[in-house]
Amino acid sequence: MLRRTFIKTAAAITGAAAVATLIAAPALAQTKWDASVPWGPSEFHTKNLIRFAEEVGKVTNGEVQITVHTGGSLGIKGAESLRSVQDGIVPMAEMAGFQQTGEEPLLGFEALPYLINDYDELEMFVGKIRGLYEAAFEKHNQKMLYTVPWPSQNIFTKDPVSSMADLKDLRIRTYNKTSTELMTALGMSPQLIPSPDIVPALAAGGIDAVMTSGSTAVAQKYWEFLDHTYRTNHLWALNQLTVNLDEWNKLSAKNQKAITDLAKKLEPEFWDVSRGEDSVKLKELENQGMTVEPMNAAIIKEMQAEGRKFWKPFTDSVAGSGPILEEFLKEAGKS
């Protein structure tokens, strides 16, 4: 009887201690965000996002967990990213801003054809436009956490290109309204195709050429379908990582600061990743048997002439862009 009483008493004490422990140490509140990215897992933008997600877990002591969904696996295409985050379909997305111009025309600013020549000019431009981009995303119910550029752009073809005649009626993949209109003006037959759909289009013979970066060309193994890489440098473009503002505002001030500080710290490192991509990926294309060479100078001159025609209509239609364009052109020595 004494032993039975001791056991009951001990059990009561243990149970009370367990309750006390639960009261003293409540369960850790955890925020879980799904992040949509249209690029495949081997793209450097995707790798950057995966690293960011891992670091967010660390700086918030596990209170914020981000799960990255690659290759449009959530059913959100690249050009649908801005609207999907705005409407809360997904809390977070890494997107190409220049593909969101149907919803927010300002985001196509840096991707105006032949406006920007290199990373240094792009960095200068971002310094001037960043506040407007952040405000544009806020208007669409989201916070911009960081922005990172794609490397220089190229045109990839099956057949060699040495004159404008070789481009006539070429069925080429484009990635936004401006690039589609530019290729049309040059006599090609552009098709606006999301990144995950490029390889199926090549395999089915639906397109003869692709415009994109060397990074995407390597990730999608273009050497299996195409033979030539032409350095056109026809535009520079930024990606952004954003989060739905309603979700963001649920975070503690401490975690908001930790995440924004982390984004500020990692963004320059992500730019360095982008800078290192171009030469490495172009070398890989050569190693796989593709030619890599500058586009014919006469073609580039024609592309530049057509590309500049997009600048004034843009500044005429997008509020606040005119003064920034003038300031940038002056500082870059192009005015």
Image (spheres, rainbow, N blue to C red):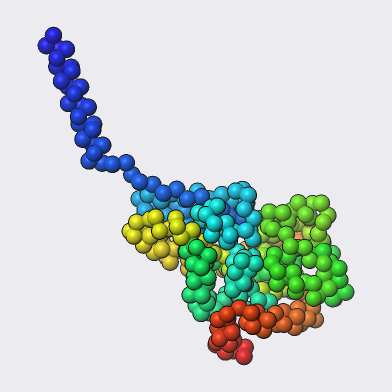
Instruction: Give the answer, above or below, for where 219 lies relative to 306.
Output: above
- Is 185 situated above or below 23? below
In the image as oriented, which residue stretches furthest toward the left? 2
The residue under the point 83% across, 55% down is 205
Percent position of residue 45, x then y: 57, 59
Residue occupying the far right of the picture: 165
Q: Tell me, yes or no, if residue 222 can be seen here.
A: yes
Q: How many numbered marks have been drawn onto this rendered protein structure? A: 0
- Residue at 59 percent across and 73 percent down: it is 106
Q: Tell me where residue 240 appears, x and y as whole percent.
A: 54, 64
Q: Quadrant of the C terminus?
A: bottom right
Q: Position of residue 236 (x, y in %)?
A: 63, 72
On the image, the x and y values in percent for residue 221 come to: 71, 54
Quarter of the figure with the N terminus: top left
Residue at point 79% right, 51% down? Answer: 203
> Which quadrant of the figure has residue 5?
top left
In the foreground, 319 or 19: 319
